Image: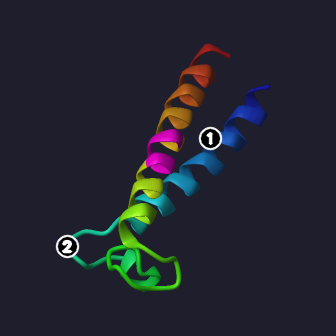
């Protein structure tokens, strides 16, 4: 069980890092390559994509902490 939770923790951490790097920070960062910060781009409207990116980041952050707590209790 501990091995499964440890592998899951690493996978969640990598996904969370990628999600944080995709956030726009004053029109810079990795998100500029995907058009997240602007109105145009391959992903459509920037505000809707940014909102969904925020939701996914929060979801994976909560999942990361829940998994960390589960690892402490194993």
Nearest the eye: 7 or 39: 39
- Residue 37, by quadrant, is bottom left
The image shows a total of numbered marks equal to 2
Q: Residue at x 52, y 84 (%)?
A: 42
Coloured how?
rainbow
Badge 2 marks a residue whose secondary structure is loop
Front residue (pair 71, 66): 66
Q: Residue 2 magenta-drawn? A: no
Left or right of 10 on screen, residue 62: left
Q: Residues within 10 Å of mark 2 (few under 14, many from 20)?
A: few
Horizontal side, residue 73 vs residue 22: left or right: right
Mark 1 sits on what residue?
A: 9
* Residue 74 spot, x, y in % from top left: 68, 16
Q: Tell me if residue 43 can be seen.
A: yes
Query: Image point 49% across, 33% down: which residue?
Result: 62
Q: Secondary structure at mark 1?
A: helix
Q: Position of residue 57 (x, y in %)?
A: 46, 49
Q: Above or below — where is 40 with respect to 61? A: below
Residue drawn 62% across the image and 41% down it: 9
Residue 12 placed where, x, y %? Answer: 60, 47
Please state if 34 lies on the left or on the right of 26 as rendered: right
Mark 2 / mark 1, whichever is N-terminal: 1
Q: Which residue is mark 2?
A: 26
Residue range in magenta is: 55-59
Task: Please name the residue shown 52% across and 77% down the image.
Answer: 43
Which residue is outermost to the top?
73
Q: Nearer the viewer, residue 10 or 18?
A: 18
Quarter occupied by the N terminus: top right
């Amino acid at each position: 069980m501990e091995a499964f939770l440890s592998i899951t923790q690493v996978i969640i951490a990598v996904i969370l890092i990628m999600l944080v790097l995709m956030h726009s920070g004053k029109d810079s960062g990795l998100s500029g390559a995907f058009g997240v910060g602007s109105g145009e781009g391959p992903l459509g409207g920037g505000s809707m994509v940014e909102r969904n990116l925020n939701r996914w980041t929060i979801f994976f952050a909560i999942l990361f902490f829940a998994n960390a707590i589960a690892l402490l209790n194993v």
